[in-house]
Amino acid sequence: MIGDLIEAPACRECGCTQNNACVTNGVPCHWVEPDLCSVCAGKPDVRGLAIISASQAADALAELLRFAREGDGLTGPFQTDVVEQLLDAAKMAMEVEGYDTERPERAEVYAAIVNFLDGWA
Ligand SMILES: [Zn+2]
Ligand SMILES: [Zn+2]
């Protein structure tokens, strides 16, 4: 059969195929895009999040090093929101890592960061 010669499409994220779907709570995935299944389409873009987190952390790092070399900025030690950037980076890193329900203090830290950053950015 000619159809058997055409390679079955696979999900670009998890590699599942028509005949080997991911199953969540007993429900198999379906195609959202030609090469993206519904399970992966519903996941947050954690790699994209990691890039943003790294970028925030890098900006904070640069300002910390600037302070180490040059000292105080115009309004205080830092010319940028170093602490906010680091916390934002940490928050996104936590989102990338996901949640460990056995460590409630982590959820508290996350909530405190979200609260602290509310209105910033
Ligand atoms: Zn998938
Ligand atoms: Zn799938």
Image: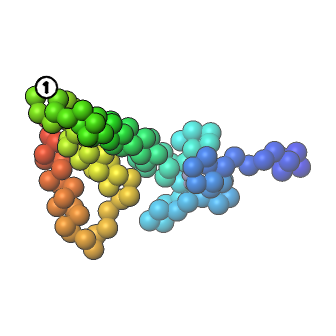
Placement of 79 over or under 86, stated as above or below = above
Q: Is residue 16 above or below residue 119?
A: below
- Residue at far left of view: 75
Judging by the rendered image, the residue that carries numbered circle 1 is 74
- Taking the spot 41% from the left edge, 45% from the top edge, the residue there is 50
The answer to whether residue 53 shows anywhere in this view is yes
Q: Residue at x 17, y 61 (%)?
A: 108
Q: Secondary structure at mark 1?
A: loop
Q: Position of residue 83 (x, y in %)?
A: 20, 43
Quadrant location of the C terminus? Answer: top left
Left or right of residue 81: residue 10: right
- Residue at 24%, 37% in the rendered image: 67
Q: Amino acid at mark 1?
A: Leu
Q: Which residue is drawn at the image coordinates 26% and 45% (left, top)?
A: 86
| Image position of 72 with respect to 37: above or below | above
> 21 or 71, which is in the foreground?
71
Task: Locate residue 118 relative to residue 88 in the image: left or right.
Answer: left
Residue 120, visible in the rendered structure? no
Residue 60 lies left or right of residue 83; in this view the side is right
Is 94 displayed left or right of 50 in the figure?
left
Q: Position of residue 62 (x, y in %)?
A: 33, 36
- x, y percentage for residue 114? 18, 47
Residue 71, picture quadrant: top left
Pick out the residue farthest to the right: 1
x and y, in percent, of residue 88 in the image: 26, 44
* Near-viewer residue (86 or 21): 86
Furthest residue in direction top, as rendered: 74
> Total marks drawn?
1
